Amino acid sequence: MQLETPWPSEEVRPRLPWISYQEPEPHLDDVVEKIVQLPGVNQDTLIVGLSYKDYTVLARLERKGFHRTWRVGLEELGLTAPGSGMESIQSVLNTDMGELLRARKGTPGVIVVRHLLEHSNSVGAVLKALQAWGGENAYFVFEVPDSEETFRQLDVSTLWEEHVSYFTEFTLERAFAPHGLDLLEVARYPYTLEDCLVAFVANRRPSQVPPVQAEKIAAELALGINFREGLEELGARCRNELKAIQAKGDTICLLGAGHRAATFINLLGLGDLLSCIIDDDPRKAGLFMPGCQLPILPSSHLLEARPALCLLAAAPDSEAAILKRNDSYLSTGGVMASIYPRSTRAWLPVRPVSAKL
């Protein structure tokens, strides 16, 4: 599943230097164990991290004695614009760039590519660039978020202007053979917000291409169609619940001024029903949320205004700490509920209402 028309990379490049993205990492110890066990990989193998998201993998390998590592810098990719990230890296990856990188420091035996494929306007172009860069039988380690459960549960926040492709385990497994690459394994690592999928791929033609499975393809199409059609119903449920709260003279806010919150509010059309966004990051103080233009206020506002409901857009793993910090608000009748269906504190309107979804 993909965006029909991706945003130009220069339009989604962060405009503020402090904006950063954090991916879950507890599974990386296991990923590193799988890398070092790949046939032919040893401490003389050149192992590359394509972006800053891969550097912690290299650090783990270095602690194991693998010191032929290369952290590719943005300048080595010809990227000089402030704020350049995955959206910019994918835009310059082509076969010429792959050959240039190979000429610069030699042929890598392993290239780690975490969270780039889903940002890529053309997955095929990125794979061709990596094939030109890595040697014969080089290994590629791709990590992407799994979208199957988030789509099934109508987690609208999974949509993001920086993500072009939305992989499931089925589609990731079939992404490589058409480009002459041999998939060795896809490992799944469960997390509370969305699972991570890691594909281990060899730069060689596969011995066999997975057969087309009509029922699996039909299921993928149904997943996307149900998600698209379910968003209207989801938006109606959320709006009705918020209007009922407002009808009692109460207010509602949302905690967590991140991209998932912006997506949730704007795509479901909830901006006119919320009073503000709560976030204690001092760099966001005095700013406004994209699209809905709601003001960003500190958590002290919860005690001052006492909204009846505070929706949580922070990761479920952070909820316990957030609840503890805001115990005074909760003890006086305030309610906190998550916008994420997988959270144990999921807000009632966002919970799946049928097996179909």
Image: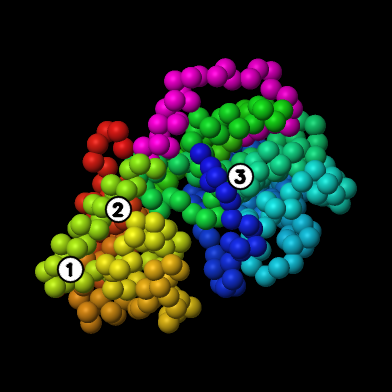
Q: What label does residue 235 carry, if any?
A: 2
Frontmost of labels 2 and 3 is: 2
Residue for point 44% across, 78% down? 287
Circle 1 residue: 246
In the image, 114: left or right of 262? right
The local secondary structure at tag 1 comes to helix
In magenta stretch: residue 220: yes
Give coordinates of residue 71: x percent, y percent. 72, 55
Give coordinates of residue 234: x percent, y percent. 29, 49
Quadrant of image for the C terminus: top left
In the image, 173: left or right of 278? right
Residue for point 72% across, 28% down? 180
* Mark 2 Cα shell of 10 Å, populated few (<14), some (14-19), many (≥20): some
Give coordinates of residue 144: x percent, y percent. 54, 44
Comparing 104 with 255, the one in front is 255
Q: Which residues are magenta?
A: 200-227
User: Which badge, 3 or 1, is on the more N-terminal residue?
Assistant: 3
- Gap between marks 3 and 1, in whole Å? 42 Å
User: Which badge, 2 or 3, is on the more N-terminal residue?
Assistant: 3
Residue for point 16% across, 72% down? 250
Is residue 89 among the parts visible in the rendering? yes
* Mark 1 Cα shell of 10 Å, populated few (<14), some (14-19), many (≥20): some
Circle 3 residue: 117
Residue for point 25% across, 55% down? 238
In the image, 216: left or right of 84? left
Say what amino acid the circle numbered 1 marks. Gln
Say what amino acid the circle numbered 2 marks. Gly
Say what amino acid the circle numbered 3 marks. Leu
In the image, 348: left or right of 265? left
Res 277 → quadrant: bottom left
